[in-house]
Image (spheres, rainbow, N blue to C red):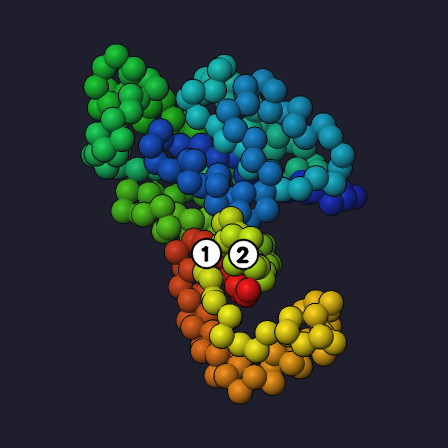
Amino acid sequence: MGVTARPGSSARTRAVLVTGASGAGRTTATHALEDLGYEIIDNLPLSLLPRVFDGPSSMPPLALGIDVRNRDFSVHTMVGVLDRIASEADIEAELLFLDCRPETLVRRYSETRRRHPLAPSETPEIGIDREMELLVPIRERADHLIDTSDMTPHDLKAEIERRFGRDGSGMLVLSVESFSYKRGLPRGVDIIFDTRFLANPHWQEDLRDLDGLDERVAAYVKGDPRFPRFFRAIETMLLDLIPAFKEEGKTYLSIGLGCT
């Protein structure tokens, strides 16, 4: 489905159409794209998809989730939509198809106890076979084909990042905040360090009304002989942890420094 720009075309909107077998990981893939900065539009009726691109010429990258549960889904309609989007000079569209072995899909449906959308009153095997046959023409048009049979969700996220990540889009965002134990722990903090053993500038009358951004407060805390070793220990630990968290697919890490 790759698109070739016409002469004179300006900035183009990147769009990834995500489809494939039900249970193959479409939700995981769209969440991974969202973490990479893509705007997610899921299960929009196929007839409305071309209108998504009627907005401003400069749009964020889009990830469009499509599967057999879309209200007006049919292979004929899907092919027509793909052809129409591919004909637009200002759209750089790619079709991502998520595939999976039937026996793996059966196991996943058994584990989640969900019904297959094409066989709600029958066994998942019947729905899987129907869908596999239905999606053959779509699969053949894929720009990216990923078999998730032997993948964990983390593996799939890593593969999505490798294929669709832009410079800096797959980085882990690190947030560091200070808080007072008297007011309770902040919500959503992943790691907390208790700093109440360090010299407290609150007890210095000339520093009491200043905050931690003031150089005098920073110098006072750093002057505690225990500070350098404490700081190095945190630094060493985080340098080990951050790459590990990123490998696990974590995109945001919040660190809290607690004081009195």
Instruction: Indicate the amino acid at tag 2.
Output: Lys
State left or right for residue 205 relative to residue 15.
Answer: right
Q: Are marks 1 and 2 in contact (CB under 8 Å)?
A: no
Disc 1 residue type? Asp
Mark-to-mark CA distance, 1 and 2 = 19 Å
**Near-viewer residue (10 or 231):** 231
Residue at image coords 47%, 67%? 194
Q: Which residue is mark 1?
A: 190
Vertical placement of 146 versus 241: above or below?
Answer: above
Residue 163 point in image, percent of width and height:
49, 51
Quarter assignment of residue 206: bottom right
Q: Quadrant of residue 64?
A: top right
Left or right side of 53 for 142: left
Q: Which residue is mark 2?
A: 182
- SS for tag 2? helix
Residue lying furthest top: 121
In which quarter of the view is residue 205 placed?
A: bottom right
Q: Residue furthest bottom?
A: 225
Q: Nearer the viewer, mark 1 or mark 2?
A: 2
Work out which residue is located at the far right of the displayed protein and give it: 8
Residue drawn at x 54%, y 56% is 182
Residue drawn at the location 53% of the way across and 87% of the way down: 225
Count of marks overlaid on the render: 2
**Mark toward the start of the polypeptide (1 vs 2):** 2
Q: Position of residue 165 (x, y in %)?
A: 54, 53
Position of residue 105 measured from the top left corner of the image (x, y, whole percent): 26, 33
Residue at x-position 49% and y-position 75%: 197
- Of the pair 189 and 147, the residue shown nearer to us: 189
Q: Dot 1 lies on which element?
A: loop
Residue 150 in picture, x, y percent from top left: 27, 47
Quadrant where the C terminus sits is: bottom right
211 relative to 15 in the view: left or right: right
